Amino acid sequence: MTVLSEYDVIVVGAGIAGISAAVKAGRSGCSVLLIEQYGFVGGMSTAGMVSPFMKHDVNGDVLVRGVFAEIETEMRKQHGMIDNGFYAHSFRSASYHLLQEAGCTVLLHCVVADAAMKNGTMESVTVFAAGAEILIKGKVFIDASGDAQLLFLGDLPWVKGDEKSGLLQALTLFFRMGNIDLDKVAAYAAHNKADFFEWMDFTFDPTRIMSVAGYFAAVNKAIREHRLAPDVQYIFFTTLPGSGEGSFNTSNILNLDGSSSQDLTRAELAGRNQVHQIVTLLKNEIPGFEDSYLIETAPQVGVRETRRAVGEYVVTGEDITHGAKFDDAIARGCYGIDIHGQKGESSIMEHLAEGMYYEIPMRALLVKNSDNVLAAGRCISSTREGHSALRIQPTSSATGEACGALAAAAVASGRSVRDVDYGEVQDRVRYNISKR
Ligand SMILES: Cc1cc2nc3c(=O)[nH]c(=O)nc-3n(C[C@H](O)[C@H](O)[C@H](O)COP(=O)(O)OP(=O)(O)OC[C@H]3O[C@@H](n4cnc5c(N)ncnc54)[C@H](O)[C@@H]3O)c2cc1C
């Protein structure tokens, strides 16, 4: 087997968490390898086409800065962002820019297929790169795969789904449409408020992002007439920088597991079917969509929830709703519990009171039974409820960046990640844990 040298830090998965971890470790002087199975970076932010970024500020205090803010700045320079909504292509190029500038090595089209452990230390990963098996050694490993794939491969502890029922959140295939008459959409919604969610702001300002969610009557009628899959509950889209463009978070795919290839295949097919039905409904029946068209569906179905790490601390739903604070805080968030329910399960959306936020402890990144493996992003150590809040993009970036900082502190002093004092990590990510 080919051995492709050794790196200080190996990051598995180039979603927003992996990118943030790699950039931080690279800037801190580490040699960093970021491995991604697709031919592009971004994970759910690009392969899943998830937009916009969820709320991450309280009373004017922006909770996530650092690499996340730099990605935003780059995207704004490219006119790829409006408010918190953005294009996947812009996210990709902004991320490449930061990764290159930080001196990270990025290996695309490469699947991590095995991990070798010895006495609690991960020694190497084996990757499949265009049919060849390559062994790569590292000092610190960061699981930013979203699915805790690295822990699974290294036989490290993880859990999946609801603690009692094992249920996983619904899957959604995003899609993008163009040439929507947004003035007409806004006027229609303003005259039919009962047909939309109460939280909607019914004004349309082309310089701001607009969120439209509802069309309950048309959706229910189409379901009754067997023109729409019965699992679709409403139509939800947010606008994008291009005039008349919308990003649709509408399809609803149930009873499938996003960590199984067979289930993912079923989800891709079901999602594309639903998109076809939804686009037809919009074009034929919804004011403002008469001349619209489908631009693209996401390269892969959006996966909200699969495996989670079991770490030295497990972030709970109560930590989220009570705004927990920790001595070893390394990130903050203000997004509430958000579970997109499965069949037979109600959805939950519990917003935090305005002004409230919670902290995330460094221990939630430290994977049990290992001394050099960290978890970043949506697979950090949490309960299902905790995960449903922590999984959003800004928070995933912040926990990723903290992993990069912790890995760099360990490498610099030749210590285990467990022996790094949390104060050292806090000093490296101060902008994400204290008010400015
Ligand atoms: C339908 C949906 C709607 C959402 N809505 C919002 C929203 O409106 N706002 C918001 O902020 N967040 C939202 N989220 C949440 C958010 O998008 C994700 O939780 C977040 O982007 C996760 O980032 P991550 O880096 O942890 O993981 P991911 O983005 O999943 O990245 C993991 C990466 O690892 C790679 N990978 C996995 N296994 C391997 C392997 N073995 N070898 C190599 N590479 C591997 C994957 O290809 C992927 O690129 C939504 C998510 C979904 C699915």
Image (tube, helix red, strand yellow):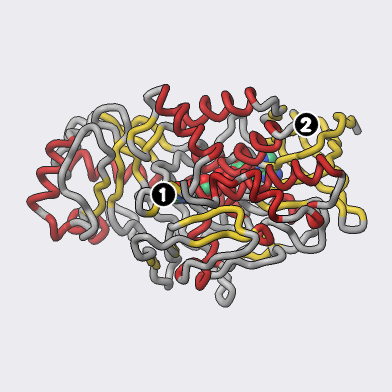
Element class at badge 1: strand
Identify the residue shown where x is 65% and y is 41%.
21
Instruction: Name, please, the residue furthest toward the bottom.
Output: 164
Q: Quadrant of the N terminus?
A: top right
Residue 302 in sight in this render: no
**Residue at figure coordinates x 39%, y 64% from the top left:** 352
Residue 320 lies, with reference to residue 365, above or below; the image says below
68 left or right of 231? right
Give x and y (percent) for residue 158.
Answer: 70, 63
Numbered circle sitting on residue 31? 2
Q: Going by the image, does 433 lie left or right of 155?
A: left
Q: Nearer the viewer, residue 273 or 372?
A: 372
Q: Position of residue 50 (x, y in %)?
A: 44, 42
Question: Do labels 1 and 2 touch, CB within 8 Å?
Answer: no
Which of disc 2 and disc 1 is earlier in sequence? 2
Regarding mark 2 in the picture, which secondary structure is present there? loop
Residue type beneath disc 1: Asp
Q: Residue at x 19, y 54 (%)?
A: 218
